[in-house]
Amino acid sequence: MHADSPRDAHALLLNGTVGVGKTTVAEAVGDLLADAGIPHAVIDLDWLRKSWPTPPGDRFNFGMLLRNLQAVTGHYLDAGATRLVLAGVIEDQDERKLLADAIGAELLVCRLRAELSIIHQRLARRHGNEPEALRWHLNRSGELDGILSRSAVDDFTVDAGTGSVADVAAAVLRAAGWT
C-alpha cells in the first residue's frame, strides 16, 4: 500500500473474456459506490496498456500496464479512494500477483461470465463495421474463456449474461462483500 493511502483500501478486478461487459459493469459498480458515498476510482486497464509497439514477448503489453497502474492507483489512493474498481484481464496467478503488487492494496478478482453466443452478439454490435476486428474478437472470446476457466484466478463469478447492468453490478458488490 502507498505510504499515505487509506489503510482500508481494497481493489476489485472485473475479469472475463472480451465482450463480457467488464468496462460497462465497472462503471455501474462505480455509480453504486458513489451513490453509497464510498470514495473510489474506476480504471479500465486496457487504456493503461495501450501503446505501440509492444515489447517482444509481451503480446498484451502487461509490463506497461503494471507501470502505469502503480502510478495511477497511487494517486487515487493518496487522494482518499478506499475502493479501486478495475476492468481488465489477467490470465494466471503470476499476473494476479503482479497486478496486486502494482496496486498496493488487497485485490479481489470477480470473473464475469456469459454464454459465448451472448458475447458473440455483443461483439457483433460493437465491431459490426470492422470485419477484421470482429473476427479477432470472436476468436479471442472463446480462446480467452477457455484460458480463464483453466486458470482459476478468480475469487468469485457473477453471471453477466442476463439481467440489467445495474443488477450485475449490484451482484458483484454483494459477492465482493462491499455492500
Image (cartoon, rainbow, N blue to C red):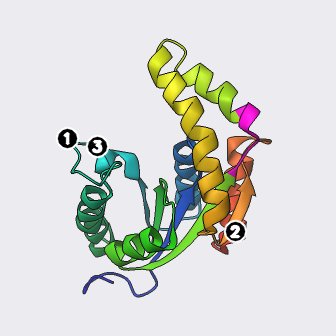
Which residue is pictured at 51% across the width and 67% down the height? 92
Q: Residue 17's spot in the image, x, y percent?
A: 59, 46
- Given the current orientation, which residue lies at the most extreme right position? 162
Mark 2 and mark 3: Cα distance apart in space: 28 Å
Element class at badge 1 = loop
Q: Earlier in the sequence, mark 1 or mark 2?
A: 1
Look at the numbered discs 1 and 3 and tell me whether their residues touch, using CB distance below 8 Å: no
Residue located beneath label 2 in the image: 156
Element class at badge 3 = loop
Q: Residue 93's spot in the image, x, y percent?
A: 50, 73
Which amino acid type corresponds to the residue marked 2 in the rendered image? Phe
Task: Name the mark on residue 53.
Answer: 1
Q: Which residues are magenta?
A: 113-118
Residue located beneath label 3 in the image: 50
Q: Nearer the viewer, residue 10 or 22?
A: 22
* Magenta stretch holds residue 116: yes
Q: Earlier in the sequence, mark 2 or mark 3?
A: 3
